[in-house]
Image (cartoon, coloured by chain):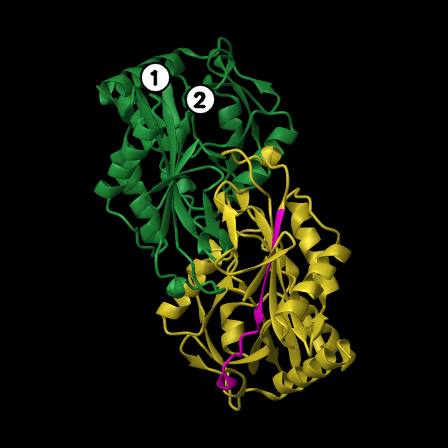
Chain colours: A yellow, B green
Amino acid sequence: MIINLNGRICSEDEAVISVLDHGFLFGDSVYEVVRTHKGKLFTAKEHLERLQRSANRLMMMLPLTNEQFTEELIRTHKILNVDEAYMRLIVTRGVGALELHPASCQSQNYIIMAKPIDNWADELYSKGMSLSIVSILRNDPFALDPQIKSGNYLNNVLAIIEAKKSGADEGLMCNKYGYVSEGTNFNVFMVKDNVLITPELSSGILEGITRMIVLKLARANDIQVVEGKITPEDIISADEVFISSSTRDIMPVYKIDNTLLPKPTPGKMTQFLAQKFQEFLDVSVS
Amino acid sequence: MIINLNGRICSEDEAVISVLDHGFLFGDSVYEVVRTHKGKLFTAKEHLERLQRSANRLMMMLPLTNEQFTEELIRTHKILNVDEAYMRLIVTRGVGALELHPASCQSQNYIIMAKPIDNWADELYSKGMSLSIVSILRNDPFALDPQIKSGNYLNNVLAIIEAKKSGADEGLMCNKYGYVSEGTNFNVFMVKDNVLITPELSSGILEGITRMIVLKLARANDIQVVEGKITPEDIISADEVFISSSTRDIMPVYKIDNTLLPKPTPGKMTQFLAQKFQEFLDVSVS
């Protein structure tokens, strides 16, 4: 891994930040994960726009323009020099007084962590992953909106700990009304009677960029799409379930809690959309 | 300010932490603020026990025993060498992989930030402070329990930003049911018809140590105490309102939103309890 610390490229060991940065003290930071494909940034524009929206909601200024961030991402990626890279861009509120209000924070810090993207096990794509619907609820949008991609991830940490304890690969969270919202760091989709269904934004989820692409691809291919309310019972009795994320693309689910989904996994629509997504990925960077 | 970083005393400038510490990446840390009075630690035992409870809820190990933490607090305080000190003890999950699950975090880090305690303006005690009931709800205990004193404080940051924007000194948050819960970093009390009323723990609040002492002192002095549900209307129409925190002790409130509370502020019971608290503080360290 190499790290870009406010424009200075350094090693993991050198990448340190003041303990008085509000990003450390309060998790007062925003972030995005941008990947590259075949050596080119993928959907960087969308990620940087979302970073800006996250910052806006926290009344946080960004230290660079989107153009400057893009240049730094490209420069960092060139030094890393791998085709398929994971780049985590974090912007912190900066160093300030030991008080919650950010008024004393004079200058934001940014960090780009770049490394080869994780190779998820082939089996997770061919056989699928298992999900657990955890008891931890997703953060209430009226308290801390999941649309803000921030440094406050304990809600998700508690969810993944609970999911792993139950033997599942990943955790799925419900909102306070009992509807399925999202995973610890992914969106979720189900297929029922050839309709593609995913939790609506008002269920309290991050508007995933892979999610957005999947919905576009589905609509472009005349698949009926519903963004709505999904109960745990709905998803457990689905014909197909898959997840989406920037580092995993589309990954099928074969089991939720102790219920096996209908075989074969991945299902037909999951396979179709995964194929379309791969084509989109290839075309986007060509 | 001086900083104790895993046992090594350093200056503000030297106090840095890896950007790969999960405390920085996800706010995956717990903390306490311990004060000294007349050169002695005040209620350190209670704070360290609460730190342990916060860590337990996050399935986090602590790197030192309570006895060892106490020794480090005393040692750090001796070097700072002021009678009235503020000491923030933070324990982070430690450096790990870029994934939410803490399994890869091998060793927790601890940090003690020590400085002279803030001198709040005399006016805040003599005239009182103003509160705004903010629109941001307090974190849902079923998502991220406010009883966990952690590095996830964006909920509170949003609340204080909103309160300050409206011209108030501080913000008061309600829970998802609409009842008053707590401030951005303090508990709240009201007095009505000589009864002392404070939000019950199940309203989704941190169990404040100053709150606990205030309740004990009230009961010991035959004041009727209710831990229950408080609506915004209840508190706005109270006879007296005050807040409690480890750095502010008891501070009266003279205004909530645009409503002035009955004069004179501080009210009689607030004055009485503030006096009793001061006596308790003096006796505790003697």
- Residue A112 among those drawn in magenta: yes
Q: Kindly indicate whether the residue at mark 1 contacts the one at mark 2 (C-beta within 8 angstroms).
A: yes
The secondary structure type at the circle numbered 2 is strand
Q: Where is residue A164 in the image (x, y as percent from the top left)?
A: 39, 69
The residue at which mark 2 appears reads as B242
Residue at horizontal 56 percent and vertical 46 percent from the top: A28
Residue at horizontal 27 percent and vertical 32 percent from the top: B74
A129, above or below A184, in the image: below
Asked if residue B52 lies left or right of residue B244, the reply is: left
Residue B271 image-quadrant placement? top left
The residue at which mark 1 appears reads as B273
Q: Position of residue B121 (x, y in %)?
A: 50, 16
Q: Can residue B33 be seen in this view?
A: yes
**The C terminus of chain B, quarter of image:** top left
Q: Which chain carries label 2?
A: B
B32, above or below B41, in the image: below
**The N terminus of chain B, quarter of image:** top left
Closer-to-camera residue (B134/A161): A161
Closer-to-camera residue (B262/B163): B163
Q: Tell me the tag on residue A188.
A: none
At label 2, which amino acid type do we have? Phe
Q: Position of residue B158 (x, y in %)?
A: 58, 40
Which range of residues does the magenta coloring cover? A109-123
At label 1, which amino acid type do we have? Leu
